[in-house]
Amino acid sequence: MVRFISSYAHLLLMNAFLVLAVFTMSYSCTSSVTTLQGSNDMDQPPAIFVLGDSLVDPGNINYINPLKNNNFPYGIDFPTGKRFTGRFSNGRTIIDIIGEELGVKDYIPPYLDPTTVGDVVLRGVNYASGGAGIFNDTGAVFGNRINMDAQIDYYANTRNYIITNIGSGGSKKLLNKALFFVIVGANEFIDNYFTPFFSIPEQKLVSPEMFVDLMISKFRLQLTRLYEMDARKIVVANVGPVGCIPTERTLNYRWYAIGDDSCRSVMNNAAMLFNKKLKSLILELNSNLVGSKFVYGDSYNMLSHITNNYKSYGFENYKCGCYNILLDPTQGLHYPEPLVCEDRSKYVFWDFAHPSEATNLILAKMFLEDHDSRYTYPMNVHQLYYSS
């Protein structure tokens, strides 16, 4: 039996699956008097700093958005007692898993958590925000978020905090060795250029090719700014097959009258165009920024490989989310029974837009262990970590 939810709940649930963004709150460390006492010697795991969207948000959304994505069923499989952390997953994100594999103590904390002070900062900080985009206005229709420019501002605050406590030399050594992950760009297509719910100026004013060029131009400035603030080892993931997320398959069938639940090819084509230009940008930055080690992560082909071979990975469903919310533009959001599948490991997607923890485990391994530059170029994350 289909149950319909209220208009207010509609908005909250739309926030939940439409890959949210970035927010504007002051950095909790700047007013702290906590003194850093730790060290980051070469025999210690790297610090990890993360910028991005809901794919890697560890809970920043809890501090700025009424959604407060820290309740059931999100986090149902998270491995600690504190399940409902604000992650857009049934369990761990790809960053959580990569950090574990590299020996990082605990999970990289959200920037907006007031306890992200003191020695914990030396292990890294996560600035990612649901709804975040490269452009400042991406995701604006869905409420508070931290855009990429704001996330980099927050990283600047973190850097200044570390410098103040351990000196410029120690800070530079720590940050030069640290790993930076930048996972952003999908919302430019999902919650901006191709959104069917609201009128977005860019959609009417420019072609997809021009829109992608604007993305690359803005992204170049943002990545260069990170480099200028001592980031050297930077993993930049491209945009996945956004036209194949459950949301877009449903829209294809119910809104665009395609007749089936196939991928929305116009979105995938735009994503592939961006990815091609992004790889060229990574090559450009590695050539022009002395000492930089940018790694291009091919999330598009990683996830496509998983969905094309889903049975070999033990999955049973790659089209629908385990958290079974449906979007019908003629009726709104609703959910059939059961709300959550019994075995999350059988689903490629957790909800309408985000991979399940089972999928994140596979993606993390691809980032860490790719040895033929099939998915990571020019090296994998393990090789980046051990590089001098």
Image: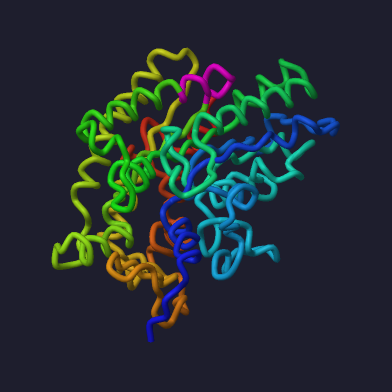
User: Residue 307 appears in which quarter of the rendering?
Assistant: bottom left
Quarter that holds the N terminus: bottom left
**Residue in front for this viewpoint, 383 or 159:** 159
Residue range corresponding to the magenta coloring: 222-232
Is 73 contained in the magenta span?
Answer: no
Q: Position of residue 114 (x, y in %)?
A: 75, 44
Left or right of 47 on screen, residue 35 = right
Q: Is residue 346 visible?
A: no
Quarter that holds the C terminus: top right
**Residue in front for this viewpoint, 200 or 374:** 200
Is 229 contained in the magenta span?
Answer: yes
Left or right of 268 on screen, residue 14 = right
Q: Position of residue 109 (x, y in %)?
A: 66, 45
Q: Which residue is rendered at x = 37% and y = 46% of the image? A: 191
Q: Eyeballing the image, is 107 above or below 153?
A: below
Q: Position of residue 103 (x, y in %)?
A: 64, 46
Q: Which residue is rendered at x = 60% and y = 31% of the image? A: 178
Q: Decide whether the magenta segment is chiefly helix, strand or loop.
A: helix
Q: Which residue is rendered at x = 33% and y = 37% of the image? A: 373
**Residue in front for this viewpoint, 334 or 262:** 334
Q: Position of residue 143 (x, y in %)?
A: 51, 47
Q: Which residue is rendered at x = 68% and y = 29% of the image? A: 158
Q: Is residue 348 visible?
A: yes
